[in-house]
Amino acid sequence: MVKRFVSIWFPHLTTDWFILQQPELKDLPFVLFAPVHGRMVITAVNIAAEAKGAYAGMVLADARAFIPDLQALDGTTLQSEMLLKEFALDCLRYTPAVAMDLPDGLILDVTGCAHLWGGDKKYLTDIITRFKNAGYKTKAVIADTIGAAWAVARFAARSVIIETGAHGEALVSLPPQALRLEQGTVELLKRLGLRKLSDFMTLPRSSLRNRFGHHMVLR
């Protein structure tokens, strides 16, 4: 039997939780922050703040300089692991094999499970709808491999079902970050003009290994 996996990504996991607790935050740009080396650094952004240019890793004071109405909440009071554990337990209804994918996702081994829901489409739709109804924005992808499902969930435009054997085709237009490469390797690839997986995925493995190391070939 061909293995099948689902990667579920929660792009606004912790900020969605805060909105559920404080509904008045829904339409306001807000971020979560935590102290890092004496500075307050953004750890998560909601959709409204993201649209105005804020991002995780930015210094809070810098974000406030160009988003005057930015709301900032203490992000140290909520750990994503706590939420993901709860979600993982809930996903046992879909498969007995569920793993947390910190900091913002889940991995499900769904081999042989989807037919119980009437096929991949109904199965994936049920998962997405369940979390949407609970108040969480979600993207989910079914694929033959964990890596392909993870990459497409985070770097493609929407949730999809990758047919068996088609995961290579699904990856060609994605950026190098989709391979979970180190940032240094990603920057080097960009400097060399290799901005999509299709730019280098057919190159000889020996060339990739010599230039970027074994980890690159493995990914």
Image (cartoon, rainbow, N blue to C red):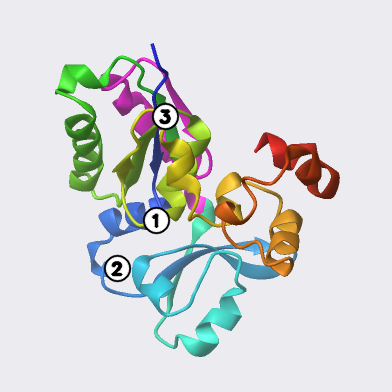
In the rendered image, residue 215, in percent from the top left (x then y), is placed at 74, 38
Dot 3 alpha-carbon crowd within 10 angstroms: few under 14, some 14 to 19, many 20 or more:
few
Q: Secondary structure at mark 3?
A: loop
- Residue where numbered disc 1 is placed: 12
Mark drawn on residue 182? none
Q: Quadrant of residue 186?
A: bottom right
User: In this rendering, which labeled residue sits more in front, label 1 or label 3?
Assistant: 3
Query: Residue at position x 31%, y 26% from top?
Result: 91
Query: Residue 198 or 137: which is nearer the viewer?
Result: 198
- Going from N to C along the chain, the mark reached first, 3 or 2, is 2
Residue 82 at least partly seen: no
The image shows residue 61, relative to residue 168, as above or below, that is below
Dot 2 alpha-carbon crowd within 10 angstroms: few under 14, some 14 to 19, many 20 or more:
some
In the rendered image, residue 151, in percent from the top left (x then y), is placed at 49, 45
- Going from N to C along the chain, the mark reached first, 1 or 3, is 1
Q: Is 86 part of what is drawn in magenta?
A: yes
Q: Is residue 42 left or right of residue 181?
A: left
- Going from N to C along the chain, the mark reached first, 2 or 1, is 1
Q: Is residue 206 left or right of residue 92?
A: right
